[in-house]
Amino acid sequence: MSDAPPPTSAREGAERLVLSALEGRVLTVTLNRPERKNALTLAMYDALTAALRGAAEDPAVRAVVLRGAGGCFTSGNDLQDFMRSPPKSHDTPVFHFLAALLEFPKPLIAAVEGPAVGIGTTLLLHCDLAFAAEGASFQLPFGRLGLVPEGGSSYLLPLMVGHRRAAELLLLGERFGADDAARLGVINAAWPAEGFAARVAERAAAVAALPPEATRLSKQLLKAPFRDELARVMRAEGEVFIGRLGSPENAEAFMAFAQKRAPDFSRF
């Protein structure tokens, strides 16, 4: 992956694929690539980072909602885009986005419909509130791809659900549903699909109506006990993740994906 910013055409394209809309005090950031299940490209990561950093500095914004268009949150990384330009350092779009999540000072709310795969699930661990529509699904398939957990998930997930359950989710990488996610505490609640967007908007408006400085300080205090350790873990995860890219196991997993077959790890 090049450390240079994406070409202007790519940035402009990403602006159409990551939409921002301010209503009242709530900024809604929407992944808008439903024909590809909102799979994330490098340019889209740049656009998400810009949206979060802009919202952090904008006094008109008191809360941010992350959602996906077309009844899908995100299927994770666009593997073709990812394979063309894998991250080679922390100074790359994926890691910039993860840093923006870690540093975001205002309430961050996730509204999950449909699949939330890979980073689509790990980013939820950084959100202050997360809600899912019935039928939503979650998956952390890093091991299946010959990779390792990212986004602080090796730290945050055991903190939330306990070591054994986190190991099951991260090592086996099996899909789990909205009710399980709510029971585990990965999300706050699973709500019926009908009226889901309105319920999320109601909760976001309630958060945005709170005293902004008290809310910011409360979030800061909630995260202060583990923030430095989380930052350390995220950097360590990133180093190992970068090292795993292009490894024989990862190459077999990505090749199997491209060839639409099951990977064969029997020779490793």
Image: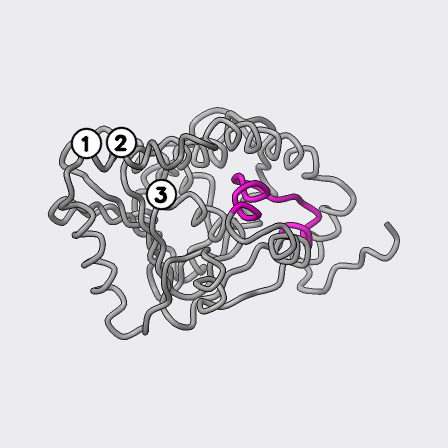
Q: Are marks 2 and 1 in contact (CB under 8 Å)?
A: yes
Q: Nearer the viewer, residue 14 or 61?
A: 61
Question: Mark 2 or mark 3, which has the lower sequence index?
Answer: 3
Which residue position holds label 2? 217
Residue 225 among those drawn in magenta: no
Horizontally, residue 118 falls left or right of residue 259, namely left
Is 28 drawn above or below residue 172 in the view shown? above
Q: Give the residue at x 36% y 37%.
A: 222
| Image depth: mark 2 or mark 3 in front | 2
Residue 240, position as x, y percentages in the image:
67, 34
Q: Secondary structure at mark 2?
A: helix
Residue 253, position as x, y percentages in the image:
71, 53
Residue 158, position as x, y percentages in the image:
57, 47
Is 126 drawn above or below residue 134 in the view shown? above
Q: Residues within 10 Å of mark 2 (few under 14, many from 20)?
A: few
Corner quadrant of residue 212: top left
**How many tags in the picture?**
3
Q: Give the residue at x 43% y 63%.
A: 182
Determine the CA span between mark 2 and mark 1. Answer: 6 Å
Q: Which residues are magenta?
A: 142-159
Horizontally, residue 13 falls left or right of residue 240, namely left
Q: Which mark is residue 213?
A: 1
Q: Are marks 2 and 3 in contact (CB under 8 Å)?
A: no
Determine the CA span between mark 3 and mark 1. Answer: 32 Å
Determine the CA span between mark 2 and mark 3. Answer: 32 Å
Question: Mark 3 or mark 1, which has the lower sequence index?
Answer: 3
- Indicate how the structure is coloured in the image: one colour
Which residue position holds label 3? 14
Q: Amino acid at mark 1?
A: Glu
Q: Nearer the viewer, residue 254 or 7?
A: 254
